[in-house]
Image: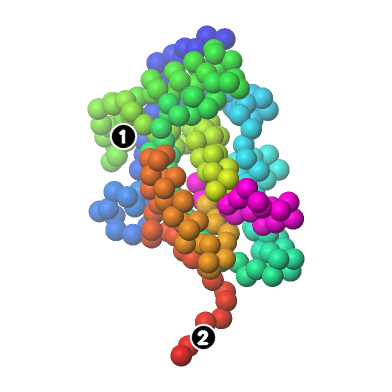
């Protein structure tokens, strides 16, 4: 396997797709990358190899995985809350978090470092060639910008980007579970420590009132360490416990 691809395979036309809100606000557009059909065929072949023999994703991640979907994650979340309530007499507080500009802020060097022990050097070189040497031109109103080479991020619209992003965020649930486990934690109480679920770049925190603030603080510390930020306008805390009004 040669870790090189034709230049035309590494050129992406980025089309800004309007989402909602003011049309004058750039953040209200989603940049979708249009790439060569030959690149897509190659990426599909690489995707199969990565998913079968590559870096194993954490059990908390349900996005873009075979036989896993949004409904499965919703059922897992409901079951965890049910177990906490019925077996541990704990009323759950849920926090739904969205990462701001997730694909555009990825540190690719971190991904390559994680993947290196799991895939061959030629395959790793091929991935680096496809993403590190990619050139982007923005297509808007039938006009294209000058090409430029992004230093960070993975292409939105690439077949491989969902998996690569999952690798990038994979240590997040591991970090949170490790923070929750104390040295003297009895095995019986390890079950409730599945304190987050992921679906691609969407994160669900599971805790109670007394521990949610600390869990959010640990999330913030980890996100700063990794170089990404949360999108407050798309984050919400769900607490279904009745409030006492004095």
Which residue in the protein does label 1 denote? 138
- Residue interval drawn in magenta: 180-202
Q: Residue at x 28, y 26 (%)?
A: 147
Question: Can see residue 30?
Answer: no
Instruction: Tell me the crowding category of disc 2: few under 14, some 14 to 19, or many 20 or more residues within 10 angstroms, Cα based.
Output: few
Q: Residue at x 58, y 45 (%)?
A: 178
Q: Identify the residue at the far top of this view.
A: 2
Tell me residue 184's x, y (percent). 65, 51
Tell me residue 15's x, y (percent). 36, 39
Q: Residue at x 49, y 65 (%)?
A: 237
Which residue in the protein does label 2 denote? 244
181 vs 158, nearest the viewer: 181
Tell me residue 62's x, y (percent). 62, 46
Determine the secondary structure under disc 2: loop
| 205 in relation to 2, above or below | below
Give me the C-alpha separation between circle 1 and circle 2.
54 Å
Q: Can residue 181 be found in the magenta stretch?
A: yes
State which quarter of the image contains the N terminus: top right
Q: Can residue 42 be found in the magenta stretch?
A: no
């Amino acid at each position: 396997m040669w870790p090189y691809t034709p230049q035309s395979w590494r050129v992406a036309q980025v089309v800004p797709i309007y989402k909602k809100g003011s049309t004058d606000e750039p953040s209200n557009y989603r940049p979708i990358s249009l790439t060569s059909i030959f690149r897509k065929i190659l990426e599909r072949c690489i995707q199969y190899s990565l998913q079968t023999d590559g870096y194993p994703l954490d059990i908390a991640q349900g996005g873009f995985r075979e036989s896993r979907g949004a409904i499965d994650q919703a059922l897992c979340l409901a079951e965890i809350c049910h177990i906490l309530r019925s077996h541990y007499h704990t009323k759950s507080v849920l926090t739904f978090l969205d990462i701001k500009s997730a694909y555009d802020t990825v540190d690719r060097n971190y991904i390559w470092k994680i993947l290196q022990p799991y895939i061959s050097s030629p395959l790793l070189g091929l991935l680096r060639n496809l993403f590190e040497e990619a050139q982007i031109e923005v297509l808007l109103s039938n006009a294209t910008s000058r090409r430029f080479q992004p230093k960070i991020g993975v292409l939105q619209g690439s077949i491989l980007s969902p998996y690569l992003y999952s690798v990038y965020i994979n240590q997040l649930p591991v970090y949170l579970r490790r923070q929750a486990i104390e040295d003297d934690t009895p095995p019986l109480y390890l079950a409730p420590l599945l304190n987050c679920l992921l679906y691609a770049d969407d994160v669900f925190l599971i805790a109670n009132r007394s521990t949610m603030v600390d869990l959010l603080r640990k999330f913030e510390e980890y996100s700063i360490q990794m170089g990404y930020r949360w999108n407050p306008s798309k984050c919400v805390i769900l607490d279904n416990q009745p409030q006492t009004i004095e």
